[in-house]
Structure formats: structure tokens, C-alpha cells
Amino acid sequence: MQLRLAFSVAAFLEPEILLVDEVLAVGDAEFQRKCINRMEEVSRQDGRTILFVSHQLNSVVKLCNSAVWLDQGKIAFHGPVEEAVSRYTQSALSTQLQSHFLRKDIPETALFEEISLGKSVIQTGDDLDVLFRLSKKYEKRELVININIRDQFGELVSHIINEDAGFTTAEKSFSKLKVTLKTLNLVSGRYSLSFWAGLDMMHGIDQLENIISFEITEQQFFTQRAAAFPSSARTIIRSEWQAD
């Protein structure tokens, strides 16, 4: 039986067993959509087997019938995909929020030495401060700094970059940086932050994945609905209604 290892090019392969490792972590939205459509076609229409490795749990539920949850290299659960995802998310929620990260062994090229949050629990619509202590080796250099927010299912809900705010590090000497994430209109739940830095978008110098977490609770005045939000909803948009 044929087995082919595919990374980010899965949409064009036709093996009997297809191993797809984090294919949805690369490429733009159009590429990811094509990959998902192709995997659905292969598994459901062609009757072939896909081993889908991903932290994006919504995609796992959509594409798979059964799932294996690996925890520190060991099988924690193997069974129906809905139960596997439920057990995984409950385990993640039971762990303590990590609102502070101090790097012990700092790589030579690293930028981030320490990262913390102003608060570990906020309400929908609040601001969130992210505090950095940075290496001085990149003082006065032009840097690109990215912040990714992911929900408890591993889905990317927002991508923040210093260029969007018109902030530049060039010709500046500083070792501390505060970034205020404004008006986080996210539904209640737990979220994690990842960080990336580069001399430009093509030349990375540092990356930290899901090292900081925070929790959002809903504000009473922000929404007045009686029913809960759909499980797939991630953001809350305030609206005004008028009738003539």
C-alpha cells in the first residue's frame, strides 16, 4: 500500500493513504480552502484514507471520523472525533492560565526575553496590554513583530503586526515594549498568543508558539441575548437597529 508524506502540497496527490502534517498552517486562505476541499473529496468520494495532523480542531472535526489525541508522545485517547476534541479542550481548559513567560535559555539570535500580560482575565470589548522585554542586540534595527491570537480550538482569530499601527523600531533604543490590543470583541473562552519577529517578513529571527494565555468573559452590557453564541462564532459585533 502506498504511503506518501505531504506537507502543504496535499491538494495534488492521489495516494491510497495520505499523511497531511499541519497543511493548514501555511499558505493563504485560498490555498487552505483548496486543500480542505481536496481532502474532503479524497476521503469521501474516492474512499481513501487521510491521516490529518493539525491543531485546528474545527478542521479536524469537519474532515475526520475518528481521532487520536497525543499528549507528550503518548496516546491519551483514540476514538470518535467529537469525543477526542472534547477531551482535548477540557484538558486544555483545566490547566492554569499562563500570563507570564520568562526565557531561561535564550538563543543567540532571539529578540524576546520576557513577555507578560497586564491581565490574565478580561471581559469582551476590553483592551489587553502585552509587555515585552527585548534583547538589546537589535536596537535601532527595523523589525517586524507579529502577534497571533488563537482560540481554544487552535483556530487563528487575529493577526497583529506593528506595521498596521505605523510603529517602527528603526533608530530607536529601547529594551521594553508595550503593545495594547484594543477592544477585543471576542466571545468568552480561552485564547493563546504566539509571537514572531523578523528583520522583514522573509527573514525571521525569533518565534514563540502559544506561550501566553488569557481568558475572556462576556460583559453584560455588551450583549443582551438569552441564548448562547454558536460554538463556531469567535467575534462579537455591536449593532444598532432602527425601524421607520
Image (tube, grey):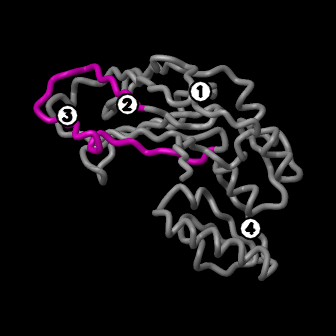
Return the residue found at the far front.
244
| Of the image marks 3 and 4, the number of the one nearer the N terminus | 4
Element at badge 3? loop
Is 193 left, or right, of 21 in this rendering? left
Q: Which residues are magenta?
A: 154-182
Disc 3 versus disc 4: nearer the observer: 3
Q: Nearer the viewer, residue 141 or 152?
A: 152
Residue at image mark 3: 169
Q: Position of residue 188 (x, y in %)?
A: 64, 32
Report, in whole angstroms, how far the alpha carbon at label 1 lies from the one at label 2: 46 Å
Between disc 3 and disc 2, whose residue precedes?
2
- Marker disc for residue 210: none
Drawn side of residue 17 relative to residue 140, left or right = right
Residue 44 is left or right of residue 187, and the answer is right
Q: Look at the picture and state if 138 lies above or below 158.
A: above
In the picture, residue 51 is in which quadrant?
bottom right
Classify 10 Å Cα crowding around label 4: few (below 14), some (14-19), many (20 and above). some
Secondary element under disc 2, as helix, strand or loop, is: loop
- Magenta stretch containing residue 172, yes or no? yes
Q: Nearer the viewer, mark 4 or mark 1?
A: 1
Q: Which residue is mark 1?
A: 221
